[in-house]
Image (cartoon, rainbow, N blue to C red):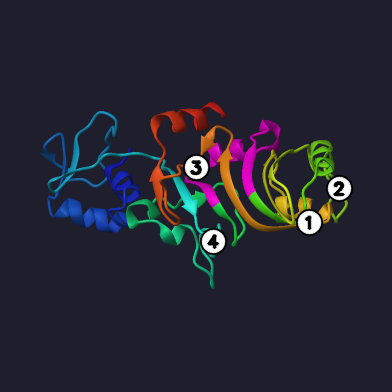
Amino acid sequence: MRIDKLLSNMGYGSRKDVKALVKSKSVTVNETIVRDSGQKVNPEKDLIMVGENVVKYKPYIYLMMHKPPGVISATDDQYDKTVIDLLAPEFQHYKPFPVGRLDKDTEGLLLITNDGQLAHQLLSPKKDVGKTYYAKISGNVTDEDVLAFAAGVLLEDGYKTKPATLNILSAGSQSEIEVTITEGKFHQVKRMFEAVGKKVVYLKRLSMGELELDQSLKLGTYRELNSEELSYCKSIK
């Protein structure tokens, strides 16, 4: 890989900016000053430094965010704050994106990465990756609803959902439930409950497959995936 491409990818500016860094003799490879911004390097073996800072190259980032309500799952928006806006510049320069979407008023687990292949696999209906949500429902959720979800629910547009697992945590005029779906249609959980005559008043995603929301993450905060979580995500490929 060219040194200018590597440093540009790592947030040191455009290739023009990197060229200026090289010209100022600020860049070294294996303790030798770089004089050509097109010099080839091996990021896995070479010691690359800018000034006194060691450059640790990584092509991809994998972040777990506890998405807060009021923020949209998008890379940019003209009107609303996005989940990418919540990231520090050190992660934003990777040009990451959210894996799937959570509604603006929904909170919970959101994976953010720049690994397009991994995102495709996690979202592919063929992989049947379950997404589990906790919800508060206006209306009494019954065993009949559990059976209806297990059979697949017919939505208002005529689409029949894939079977879903519905667990009733508490029933009553405002019920509490957990539901696991394996697809991600627009507003799917909300529309499924509307189809059985009820309304979601609070929704939080708890997990995607074996990737579970870190309960220590406060709303709007995030962290990089640990090795076990990353291994799971990559095992889906």
Which residue has dot 2 on it?
A: 154
Q: Residues within 10 Å of mark 2 (few under 14, many from 20)?
A: some
Q: CA distance from mark 1 to mark 3?
A: 26 Å
Task: State how many labels appear.
Answer: 4
Kindly report the distance in space between the C-alpha atoms of the residues bearing marks 1 and 4: 21 Å
Query: On the rendered image, what quadrant is the C terminus found in?
Result: top right
Q: Amino acid at mark 2?
A: Leu
Q: Who's the residue at 27% across and 37% down the image?
A: 40
Q: Nearer the viewer, residue 191 or 48?
A: 191
Q: Which mark is residue 198?
A: 1
Q: Amino acid at mark 1?
A: Lys
Could you tell which of marks 1 and 2 lies nearer the N-terminus? 2
The one of 194 and 35 positioned closer to us in this rendering: 194
Alpha carbon distance from label 3 to label 2: 29 Å
Tell me the quadrant of the picture where the N terminus can be found.
Answer: top left
Q: Earlier in the sequence, mark 1 or mark 3?
A: 1
From mark 4 to mark 3, how far is it between C-alphas?
A: 15 Å
Residue 11 as seen in the image, left or right of residue 92? left
* The stretch drawn in magenta includes residue 219: no
Badge 3 is on which residue?
213
The image shows residue 32 at horizontal and vertical percentages of 11, 38
Q: Is residue 164 shown left or right of residue 28? A: right
Q: Which residue is mark 4?
A: 69
Q: Earlier in the sequence, mark 4 or mark 3?
A: 4
Q: Secondary structure at mark 2?
A: loop
Disc 3: CA contacts within 10 A as few (<14), some (14-19) or many (>=20): some
Q: Amino acid at mark 4?
A: Pro
Residue mark closest to the camera, 1 vs 2: 1
- Between 182 and 206, the residue placed more toward the observer is 206
- The magenta segment is 108-134
